[in-house]
Image (tube, grey):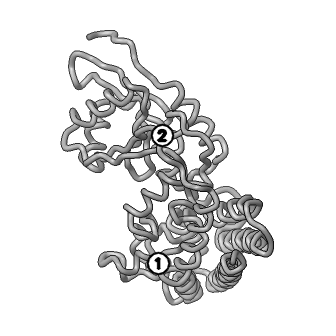
Amino acid sequence: MPGAEPVILQEAVAAFDAATAGHADLNPVRTNLLMRLVCLEASGVSRVTYNRLVMLSGYGTSFAYHPTDFWIMYNPPDHPEETEKRLVRGTGGGWEWLRKAETVEGAWQVTRESVDRGTPVQAVWIDDYVFAGYRDADEPVDRQVYALGGWREPGWMPWADLEQWVVGFGRLGRPTGPAERGSEHDTVIEIMERTVAWAQGDGRASTEWMNQGRFGLDGIEAYAADVADATKAPDYFYRGWLCCHAINRQTSGRRCAAAYFADAADLFPEPAASAMRAAAGQYEAASGAWADYRRALLGDGAPIGEEEVTQAWSDPAKRAEAAAAIRRAAEHEAAAVAEIGKALGGMG
């Protein structure tokens, strides 16, 4: 099949361009949710935003910390099955996660079949991909998939790279078509109820391999205490906690929460609406405090190298300033949760 015409879902390419345009820096972005957004939009699901996916998943208002285990913050605060159901109800977009591909041929067949019916697939990675096309060939080694995301420019992924991805990850997900979308009123109430619960009792704490972590408001204080303790050298932490992805992808959710609750307040009468707007203001203030934390250690300039990060985290004064900012963020987050509680109580 030499010279076979490539197949590319242009709807997925356009959705990817639109989704990433608003995120110049992907370090603080939940790329698994951003790529899900791309797939949903390319499949015709409307009225879905990145902020909405962050809130439905629970990442907008929950928090997880363990100094050497960053994977806990990549798991949702509720059981994955419960989280998936909420994502489907809250978007009106059906979704399926397929079993891990055992072979590169298996991943290729799923991708080709999905693309042929107009459905892009999400490929789990460190920063997820969307496979939005394929180029066939007589010899498998010459086949390629059109990959968006990851750490590469959009374009053709060679067979050898696809095979390597299968060995290391190999899991694909994809839209399954329209699903019943829940009442917006009920969805907002559910997220508010879960937000109050996560502040004190995150579901990850009851999972054996994550139960050594600290969660919710307690987790933020635990992180602040470790940052303040200058006897804990930078290598006490997994490096993702040094103002990088392990913390950035959690704290960026606070701005999502601020926008979500401010918009959702219009659905409710007083006094609930005012309490929700107050909560939005507190999450916005928390976002500012988290920015102060980062600024205390890394400054306002361009990204700095590993050596400079280590030097900053070895400075007791900078550590103290950063810890104080984290505690201000915690105060604002606690106030936000209290306002959400008032809103729920005011709904009678």
Q: Amino acid at mark 1?
A: Asp
Mark 1 highlights which residue? 202
Q: Residue at x 68, y 81 (%)?
A: 345
Q: Residue at x 60, y 46 (%)?
A: 48
Q: Quadrant of residue 321?
A: bottom right
Image coordinates of residue 13 in percent, x first then y, are 53, 30
Q: Are marks 2 and 1 in contact (CB under 8 Å)?
A: no
Give coordinates of residue 84: x percent, y percent.
42, 57
| Image quadrant containing the C terminus | bottom right
Image: 100 above or below 116: below
Q: Quadrant of the N terminus?
A: top left
319 over 47 or under it: above or below: below
Q: Looking at the picture, does residue 71 appear above or below residue 179?
A: below
Residue 227 in picture, x, y percent from top left: 56, 83
Q: Relative to the observer, which residue lies in front, 22 or 348?
A: 348
Q: Quadrant of residue 143?
A: top left
Residue placed most toward the observer, 74 or 197: 197
Residue wearing tag 2: 178
Res. 315 image quadrant: bottom right
Which one is nearer the viewer's eye here, 208 or 328?
A: 208
Residue 116 seen:
yes
The residue shown at (66%, 64%) is 257
Q: CA distance from mark 2 to mark 1?
A: 31 Å
* Residue 138 appears left or right of 151: left
Determine whether 97 is above or below 288 in the image: above
- Mark 2 secondary-structure assignment: strand
Q: Amino acid at mark 2?
A: Pro
**What residue appears at the point 58 percent right and 78 percent down from the top-left corner?**
196
